[in-house]
Image (spheres, grey):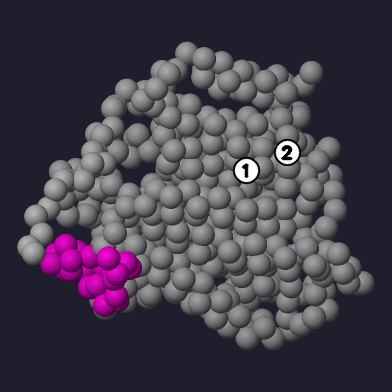
Amino acid sequence: MKIDSGDTAWVLASAALVMLMTPALGFFYGGLVRRKNVLSTIMHSFFILCLISVQWVLWGYSLAFGPDKFHVIGGLEWVGLNHVGLTPNADYAPTIPHQAYMVFQMMFAVITPALISGAFAERQRFKAFVLFSLLWATFVYDPIAHWVWGAGGWLHNLGALDFAGGTVVHISSGVSALVAALVLGRRLGFGKEKSEPHDATMTILGACLLWFGWFGFNAGSAVTAGTLATSAFVVTNTATAMAALTCMTVSWYHKRQPSVLGAAAGAVAGLVAITPASGFVNVMGAIVIGFGAGVVCYLAIQLRERIHVDDALDVWAVHGIGGTWGALATGLFATIAINSTAANGLFYGNPKQVLIQLVAIGASWGWSIVGTFAILKLVNLFVPLRVQEDEEVLGLDISQHGEPAYAL
Amino acid sequence: MDPTTVIALICSAIVFAGWLVLPHSATVKPRVVSEERSEVSVSA
């Protein structure tokens, strides 16, 4: 196998783009919380970048992509990056060094648990967060990644289409976020006191940086620098823009004024929804996916408010529901005209693909619910999940880290 | 024209046309904060 310098350069650049998404997420979330919790919120993302960077090279990559065991998990043969060197791996990316593929995938493993942190913002104990993140990455993310992307994974063998992580990243994190929000319970004053974002500009900046980094997330998943990466890049931008326009318009109709934060959240919803489809749909499919994301995620946010679930930053609505819509839409609009190695969807004469996508969606929902609930209960045996009431009132920046965000 | 294209055009039309019928300005008027400074007595 011959290493292609163009492919290698693109994948390494994409890895850096996806890495940027994690601090971008920190800003996106950070602007939405109250001032007394912004440092804690940003720290969740920054810390996970460090934690999973180590976990991945030690055992995460081996579990997710290593030699298949019973189609459900990778083995431990690649622990410590044993056998993961600089020659290409034919199963995953035959034209780039194996470690380039590994480090690209690392950044996906980093951002996925970071996404969950939005659900328990402003109330989770940092020590509990540390333990939860490590266990969740190992026992929820790594297995699902193997099922969908691993050589021999059962969903991969079934023919489930997930180009860049609609199921692996967004359904898993979004559904897990819902479980975490329910287990931890509502913030003090939820429903009685209005909790306003302390810095909307920080959130918009975060959304824009997420958008930028997502080009690496989706187009980089082509693991080649050519036509497929180009197509993924174009549909990513199109779906995101359409979702932002749609969400803003829906909020304008519903609340009688166009919400800036609604537009930003809509953009993120579009990014989420196009993720599984980005290597399989054309630009018209991207427009429909973006439109659907804008509508569906807005409705999911309203539903979450109506049932009084304190998923603080709407992780389930944007990522869980957005990812579900995207995975389903992949089964509708996939076309081999874009990716000849994949399959057609319903609108291109293959209704069976929708059923396969539903299996993948169901499996991701199911394992995320069971795994997250079990891990939270396990962690709670050793350290309380929530901070105490006076710590929550004081704010997590001071109570957990002893540092204020702003010296004002 | 394939069905995906038709649906995409309909979605786009809904969003673009929708802007024509939505309110011209925010219905919740922001509270205006006076920029004028109030006099403060300073001891000699």
Tell me whether the residue at label 1 lies in contact with that at label 2, contact meaning CB atoms closer than 8 angstroms.
Answer: yes
Q: How many marks?
A: 2
Q: Which residues are magenta?
A: A387-408
Instruction: Tell me if residue A372 comes above or below residue A256 in the rendering.
Output: below
Left/right of residue A20 with respect to residue A215 in the rendered view: left
Left/right of residue A310 with respect to residue A236 in the rendered view: left
Return the residue at label 1. Answer: A274
Callout 2: residue from which chain?
A
Percent x, y for residue A372?
39, 61
Considering the numbered disc 2 on the image, is that residue within a helix, a strand or a loop? loop
Residue positioned 22% across, 73% down in the render: A399
Mark 2 burial class by Cα count in 10 Å: few <14, some 14-19, many 20+: many
In this view, the residue in front, A360 or A227, is A227
Residue A101 shows up from this direction: yes
Left/right of residue A70 with respect to residue A37 in the rendered view: right
Residue positioned 32% across, 67% down in the render: A406
Considering the numbered disc 1 on the image, is that residue within a helix, a strand or a loop? helix
Percent x, y for residue A29?
41, 55
Instruction: Tell me if residue A148 comes above or below residue A230 in the rendering.
Output: below
Q: What is the three-letter code of the residue carrying label 1?
A: Ile
Q: Residue A407 in magenta?
A: yes
Left/right of residue A323 with respect to residue A61 in the rendered view: left
Return the residue at label 2. Answer: A281
